[in-house]
Amino acid sequence: MRLLWDFDGTLFDTYPAYTDVLYEVLSGSSPKPAILARLKVSFTHAVGHYGLSEEQIKRVFELENELHPAQTPPFPDVEQVVRLAELNVIMTHKPRKEVAAILQHYGWAGYFAEIVAGDDGYPKKPDPASYRYLHDKYRIDLAIGDREIDILPAKAIGMRTCLFQNSAPGADYYLTDYAAFQTTIVRH
């Protein structure tokens, strides 16, 4: 199976660290579960909800850049899924340098045929341009993400979709963990 992966919250459990960063920038004025819920929609949604200033946004990015890859670990069992796949690509809004640092830290750089990162010039999701590029080049079978915004571009170009730890309507498959993925989707 040829898989298109989102990065944050799909391959790597980054949201706890990002929640801590935003909590710090907000000086603890919002509870962490509320921050996490906003981030799971999108960073732009969280920025708008909390009315972050340009200075606060800059500070968020500074703190995120200071995170060590050990603070953003892969989800359990996802490496086995990546290994079983015929091909893996990543489409993320995260800058390439940050993606590369995390992949290098975990020894995963060789698992991915290509990465389309946030600084590659493609429009942000849900625009399907980056998905169309990857699908045309690699004939992707399934797009996997943790947010509705991750599957909308795939749906727009007729790809099958999977939501990870999210039950929003519209996906073809739903997973709560990757152990189940190995026995259900990859074998189809």
Image (tube, rainbow, N blue to C red):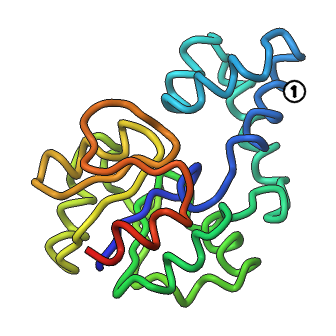
The quadrant in which residue 27 appears is top right
Between 165 and 139, the residue placed more toward the observer is 165
x, y percentage for residue 123?
31, 47
Residue 68 occupies which quadrant of the picture? bottom right
- Residue 187 lies left or right of residue 57; in this view the side is left
- Quadrant of the frame with the C terminus: bottom left
Classify 10 Å Cα crowding around label 1: few (below 14), some (14-19), many (20 and above).
Answer: some
- Viewed as shown, does residue 63 lie left or right of 9? right
Which residue is more in the foreground, 9 or 43? Answer: 9
Q: Secondary structure at mark 1?
A: helix
Q: Residue at x 29, y 40 (%)?
A: 126
Q: Is residue 92 left or right of residue 27?
A: left
Q: Residue furthest left?
A: 158
Asked if residue 39 is positioned above or below residue 112 in the image, the reply reads above
Q: Position of residue 178 (x, y in %)?
A: 54, 63
x 73%, y 21%: residue: 33
Q: Position of residue 77 (x, y in %)?
A: 62, 70
Given residues 21 and 141, the one toward you in this image is: 141
List the residue tagged with mark 1: 24
**Which residue is drawn at the image coordinates 52% and 43% (left, top)?**
165
